[in-house]
Structures are given as structure tokens and as C-alpha cells.
């Protein structure tokens, strides 16, 4: 009585048999890393609420407590001048959250574990950036709602307002890649504070809270060329809020600089972050 010879098990599918499947694996791996970051939100709701509430508290403090004594060069309501500047600060300060998350994963060995798995090498970084951008959209929406509650309005078209939102998210995208790179450089959460100390002077040496025209000459010139000032001036112009006018080249070309500055930051930070990630553990 003869028995059939069992057939050999089919070979496991290759992770990258061709360009199209390889791209599909990359998308799947990147989405898995994104979902990992989003799942962490549900596990730390208090931290998420605090992160959303802190910029709102800053906005209320400056607008309601100090706004009555502040003036805008060229006239206009200080609250409408302030709110776009606070939008910019919220996008820029997101760098700190990105750095903290990266350094925590490095310290816990999570990054080394992912690098040892059969996954797309860049999926971890892509997932981190996508999750951070989604968090930034939520944070910006909360800030817009808070601005509307205290009396801020945009006075241009909806298309112009959406353009302003786009510039804010472009700045955030550039800053998060700076945060990814710097997070891999410092390596430990305890060292993030040192970078945070440097971020605050850059933020306050901008037009977020005051017009460069009201500052001493050298400080005003420094503020006008600040990347955050470019975005703040551009979004004020698009929102139709006071403070967009100016006679200097940076003020007259704020929309151009609001695109060029983030593009320059991305051109530097993105390849450096990718190279640093490839070199981890090497």
C-alpha cells in the first residue's frame, strides 16, 4: 500500500520581491509604528491633556492678564496680534515632545529592538513623524478654539486661513525632524532639558509676543530674521490680523521666508536624522 509523499512547505514570501511589494511593506511597517505611537496616547491621557492645556494657559495668561498693557506697532488689537504668535510657539515647542519620546525609546532599548526586526529601516522614523503631526493637528485645533473663545478672529478668506494653517504645520514638520535628530544626538531624557533651555530664548527673540519695530535696533533685526518670526508674520498676514506690515525685507517677504526657513531646516535635519539612525549601534 503506497503512501503519497508529503509535499514540501511553500517558501515564505520575501519581504521585498519587487519595487511595488517593497513599497507596500514599507507602508505597512510605517503604519504599524504610527499606530504604536497613537496607542501610547490612550495609555497616558493625563499627559496628553496637560500637553494640550499648557499652551492654552499661556495664551490666556498673556492675552487676558498682560494684553491690556501691551501695544502693537502700527496699531491694532494685541489679542489678535498675540494669537497667531502663540500658534507658532505651539508648533515650535513640539520639538521638545519629539525629543523626549525619541530619547525614551533609545534609553529603553526599543529602537535597537526594532532595528533587529525584519522591518523597513525608516519605518520607525516615519511612524514617529506621522504620529507627531497628527498630535500637532489636534493641538493646533485646540489652540484655534481657545483663540476664538477669547475673541480672536481671522478676517481674510477661508483659503487664506487654510494657507496660514498650512504654514504652521510646515514649521512643525521641520521642527519635529530637528527634534528627531537632536533626540538621537543627546540620547537620554535628562539631557533634553539642556536643549529646551536653548529653545526658549529663540522663541522669545521673535515676533511672537512683540513687534520687532518696538524692540531695540539690533534685537529687532535679529527678531525679523528669526524663522519663527517669518511664520508668525506670514500667518498674521493670511489671517488678516495686525502686525503683518513692515518695511524691512524680511517683513515684506515673510510668506517666502515662511516656506524657505522650514525647507532649509528639513534639508539639514532630515538627512542627518536618517544617517544618525542608520549609525545607531554601529
Image: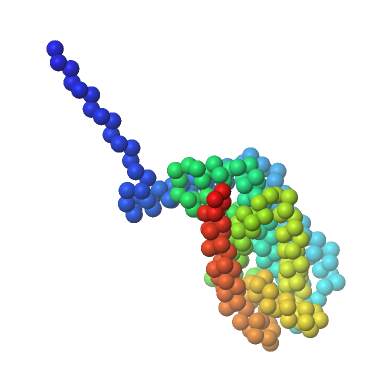
Residue farthest front in this picture: 282
The quarter of the rendered structure image containing the N terminus is top left
Answer with the quarter of the image where residue 199 lies. Answer: bottom right
Front-most of residues 199 and 48 = 199
Type of colouring: rainbow
- Count of numbered tags: 0
Answer left or right for 176 relative to 26. right
On the question of residue 274 being in view, the answer is yes
Residue drawn where x is 57% and y is 74% of the image: 260
Residue drawn where x is 78% and y is 79% of the image: 219
Q: Is residue 25 above or below residue 272?
A: above
Answer with the quarter of the image where residue 77 lies. Answer: bottom right
Residue drawn where x is 48% and y is 42% of the image: 117
Residue 62 rendering spot, x and y as whole percentages: 80, 64
Front-most of residues 152 and 170 = 170
Residue 264 rendering spot, x and y as whole percentages: 57, 71
Residue drawn where x is 78% and y is 82% of the image: 218
Residue farthest bottom in this picture: 247
Answer left or right for 157 relative to 216. left
On the question of residue 155 being in view, the answer is no
Residue farthest left in this picture: 1
Residue 67 rendering spot, x and y as whole percentages: 81, 68
Front-most of residues 107 and 35 = 107
Answer with the quarter of the image where residue 242 lies. Answer: bottom right
Residue farthest top in this picture: 1
Amino acid at each position: 500500500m503506497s503512501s503519497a509523499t508529503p509535499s514540501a512547505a511553500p517558501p515564505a514570501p520575501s519581504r521585498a520581491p519587487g519595487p511595488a511589494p517593497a513599497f507596500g511593506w514599507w507602508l505597512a511597517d510605517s503604519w504599524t509604528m504610527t499606530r504604536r505611537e497613537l496607542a501610547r496616547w490612550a495609555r497616558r491621557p493625563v499627559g496628553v491633556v496637560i500637553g494640550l492645556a499648557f499652551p492654552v494657559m499661556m495664551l490666556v495668561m498673556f492675552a487676558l492678564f498682560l494684553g491690556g498693557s501691551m501695544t502693537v506697532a502700527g496699531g491694532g488689537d494685541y489679542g489678535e496680534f498675540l494669537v497667531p504668535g502663540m500658534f507658532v510657539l505651539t508648533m515650535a515647542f513640539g520639538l521638545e515632545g519629539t525629543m523626549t519620546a525619541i530619547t525614551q525609546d533609545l534609553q529603553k532599548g526599543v529602537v535597537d529592538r526594532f532595528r533587529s526586526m525584519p522591518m523597513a529601516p525608516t519605518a520607525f522614523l516615519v511612524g514617529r513623524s506621522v504620529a507627531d503631526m497628527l498630535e500637532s493637528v489636534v493641538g493646533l485645533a485646540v489652540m484655534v478654539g481657545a483663540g476664538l473663545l477669547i475673541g480672536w478672529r481671522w478676517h481674510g478668506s477661508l483659503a487664506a486661513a487654510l494657507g496660514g494653517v498650512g504654514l504652521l504645520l510646515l514649521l512643525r514638520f521641520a521642527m519635529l525632524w530637528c527634534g528627531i535628530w537632536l533626540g538621537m544626538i543627546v540620547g537620554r531624557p535628562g539631557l533634553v532639558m539642556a536643549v529646551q533651555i536653548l529653545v526658549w530664548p529663540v522663541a522669545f527673540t521673535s515676533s511672537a509676543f512683540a513687534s520687532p519695530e518696538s524692540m531695540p535696533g539690533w534685537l529687532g533685526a535679529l527678531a525679523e530674521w528669526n524663522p519663527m518670526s517669518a511664520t508668525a508674520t506670514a500667518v498674521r498676514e493670511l489671517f488678516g490680523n495686525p502686525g503683518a506690515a513692515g518695511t524691512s525685507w524680511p517683513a515684506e517677504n515673510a510668506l517666502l521666508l515662511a516656506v524657505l526657513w522650514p525647507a532649509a531646516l528639513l534639508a539639514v535635519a532630515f538627512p542627518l536624522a536618517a544617517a544618525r539612525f542608520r549609525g545607531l549601534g554601529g
